[in-house]
């Protein structure tokens, strides 16, 4: 899960695994796998950075198979 900010300043949490597209035009549009769209204050690069950090955190927290 990553924290983002809507244009009105409201913070919200989104499941990074549900992000399908991130577009910069000039606002940042996020399209989810459900086809819902959200416009956020963060840049596309920041959304990607947070998504990668989330993914890395999940993978390092998983127990190793023996």
Image (spheres, rainbow, N blue to C red):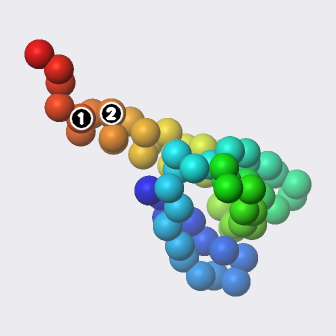
In this picture, residue 52 sits left or right of residue 59? right
Q: Is mark 1 on a helix, strand or loop?
A: loop
Query: Percent x, y for residue 63?
Result: 17, 31
Tags 1 and 2 touching, CB below 8 Å? yes
Q: What element carries label 2?
A: helix
Q: Residue furthest left?
A: 66
* Residue under the image location 70 percent in, 83 percent down: 8
Q: Is residue 58 visible?
A: yes
Q: Residues within 10 Å of mark 1 (few under 14, many from 20)?
A: few
Picture layout, residue 40 above or below residue 30: below
In this picture, residue 59 sits left or right of residue 21? left
Q: Which residue lies furthest to the front in this view?
A: 34
* Residue under the image location 33 percent in, 33 percent down: 59
- Which mark, by number, is residue 59? 2
Q: How many marks?
A: 2
Q: Quadrant of residue 4?
A: bottom right
Closest to the observer, 41 or 19 = 19
Picture layout, residue 22 above or below residue 10: above
Q: Can residue 30 be seen in this view?
A: no
- Quick one: quadrant of the N terminus? bottom left
Q: Residues within 10 Å of mark 2 (few under 14, many from 20)?
A: few
Query: Percent x, y for residue 66?
Result: 11, 16
Query: Percent x, y for residue 50?
Result: 51, 49
Picture layout, residue 38 above or below residue 9: above
- The residue wearing badge 1 is 62
* Residue under the image location 73 percent in, 45 percent down: 21
């Amino acid at each position: 899960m990553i924290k983002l900010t809507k244009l009105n300043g409201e913070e919200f949490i989104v499941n990074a695994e549900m992000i399908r597209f991130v577009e910069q035009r000039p606002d940042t549009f996020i399209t989810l796998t459900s086809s819902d769209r959200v416009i956020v204050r963060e840049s596309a690069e920041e959304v990607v950075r947070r998504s990668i950090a989330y993914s890395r955190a999940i993978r390092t927290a998983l127990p190793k198979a023996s």
